[in-house]
Amino acid sequence: MVSVALHRCRAAHPEDPTPCGGPVVVTVLDARGAGADGCEHHAARLLASLHRGRVCGLPHAAPGTAIRVFKTADGIRPFCWLDGPRTESSQLSHRENRAR
C-alpha cells in the first residue's frame, strides 16, 4: 500500500501516489458535467483518464492555465500510476494514439 498525503486536491485519484503540484487552479469536468477542482498536476492526470473530459480555469488562475493542463493531459496515459504493459488504444495517451 502506498502512503499518500492526507490533504490533496479533489482531482487526485486515491491510488495516485504523487503529491499536488501547486495550488488548486482548475476544474476538470467529465462528459456529464461532474467536476473536481485540482492542481495542474492532478488535473492533467485526471483529464487524461477521462473520456470526453474538459478543463476550466478557476477565476483566480493565471491566464492559460486550463490550456496548459489540457496540453499536458494529451501526452499522459490514462491511469498513469498503474503498472503493466500498455498496448490497447484505451491505455495510450491521445498523442500516442494520433501517432499510430
Image (tube, rainbow, N blue to C red):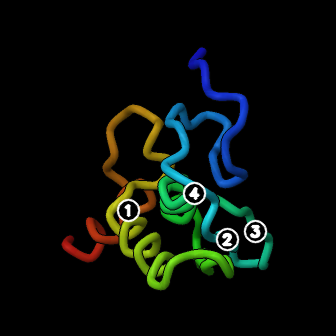
Q: Which residue is mark 3?
A: 35
Which residue bears the numbered disc 1?
89
- Proximity of marks 4 and 3: CB atoms separated by less than 8 Å: no
Q: Residue furthest bottom?
A: 63
Name the amino acid, label 2: Thr
Residue type, numbered disc 1: Ser
Provide the residue designation for mark 4.
Answer: 39
Q: Earlier in the sequence, mark 2 or mark 3?
A: 2
Tell us which disc is closer to us: 4 or 3: 4
Badge 2 density bin: few <14, some 14–19, many ≥20, Cα 10 Å: many
Identify the mark nearer the N-term, 1 or 4.
4
- Spatial CA span between label 1 and label 3: 25 Å
Cα separation, mark 2 vs mark 3, equals 6 Å
Residue toward you, 83 or 19: 19
User: Which amino acid lies under the numbered mark 4 shown in the image of this protein?
Assistant: Cys
Q: Which residue is mark 2?
A: 27
Q: Nearer the viewer, mark 2 or mark 1?
A: 2
**Image x and y of residue 97, in percent:** 30, 70
- Residue 87: x and y in percent read 31, 50
Q: Amino acid at mark 3?
A: Gly
